[in-house]
Image (cartoon, rainbow, N blue to C red):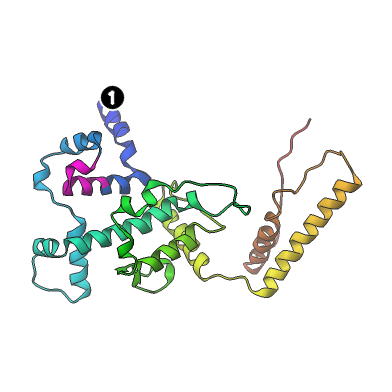
Amino acid sequence: MSTAFKDQYDSTPLQGANATYVEWLYEQYLAEPGSVPAEWRQYFSSLGDERAEIPHSPIVQAVGRRLRNGGGSTPPAALARTDAPASEKQAAVSRLIQVYSLRGHQIADLDPLGLWERPVPAVLSFDFLGLDDSDLSREFYTGGLAGTGQQRMKLQDILALLKQIYCGKLAAEFAHISRARERLWLREQFETCRVHWQFPAPEQTTILDSLTRAEGIERYLNTRFVGQKRFSLEGSETLIPLLDDLIQRAGEQGVQEIVIGMAHRAG
């Protein structure tokens, strides 16, 4: 293996969805080297003299506040020292929002019977992120999370909104998408729809009617042709309203013909 290829291969775990986590680890390393695992300390120390670096997040947050407040003459280093605790909490909330968008689907409410016990990943806990219950009533900058238009929200409201979006009856996982534009577009669409979209009563009735008819024909076939091999719809009923909506929207956009096929194998 060539040296250039080996270097690229060795750096692969640092890219993509892991990049944010690695950056956060480096911030922790700069603030307190002993807070990161030994293998990461060894790796970060190999990058150069850590004394030449300082944690970046407090400075970034402080400069952002200065710009929003019309500027000022206080040096960034002084702002970092003065507002370090608040900046660290703000950075923790930013990580909380990001982690829920990446891992929230792992604790989604997907079991209607409540029999499935799903452990909460450590990265979603307050302790891991540097927050605690005393922060729940504090306001933090969100940048208009999920299209709500609210620039600042209490942490308890942020957490409730994140759970509504990513941990409800519907969940999504799109962190694996390598193209940032596609990933961010999907995230924006998913968040906006989860917060703002509600099915009107007539549309709910139409969906229920479609599902009821599908279930009816399934029962009829099961009793009329007992033991016969057939392709059942069971488990895929939700595909019906999805296709219905897709066809209706396609027609509105000028689509003239739709062909629906299916996989089939002999035997």
* Residue at 29 percent of width and 36 percent of height: 11
Residue 203 x/y as whole percent: 68, 71
Q: Where is mark 1, residue-wise?
A: 2
| Relative height, residue 202 to residue 103 (above, below) | below
Q: Is residue 215 above or below residue 263?
A: below
Whether residue 117 is situated above or below residue 37 in the rendered picture = below
Q: Is residue 220 left or right of residue 15?
A: right
* Quadrant hosting residue 15: top left
| Residue drawn at (89%, 42%) of the image | 226
Q: Is 219 covered by the magenta stretch?
A: no
Query: Position of 66 compared to 150: left or right?
Result: left
Q: Is residue 28 magenta?
A: yes
Image coords of residue 168 (percent x, y): 53, 59
Residue ID at (12%, 48%): 53
Could one spot residue 173 in this view of the protein?
no
Image quarter in which the C terminus is found: top right
Q: Amino acid at mark 1?
A: Ser
Q: Quadrant of residue 10?
A: top left
Asked if one can make out residue 145 in the rendered structure from this viewpoint, the answer is yes
The residue segment tinted magenta is: 25-36
Q: Is residue 60 above or below residue 102?
A: below
- Pinpoint residue 264: horizontal percent, then vertical percent: 74, 38
Q: Residue at x 27, y 62 (%)?
A: 90
Instruction: Depth check: give the residue in front, 168 or 118.
Output: 118
Local crowd at mark 1 within 10 Å, few (<14), some, or many (≥20)? few
The kind of secondary structure element at disc 1 is: loop
Between residue 264 and residue 42, name the one nearer to us: 42
**Relative to residue 56, is residue 116 drawn left or right?**
right
Residue lying furthest top in this view? 1
Q: Nearer the viewer, residue 86 or 227?
A: 86
Residue 1, percent from left and from top:
31, 22
Spot the residue most to the front: 134
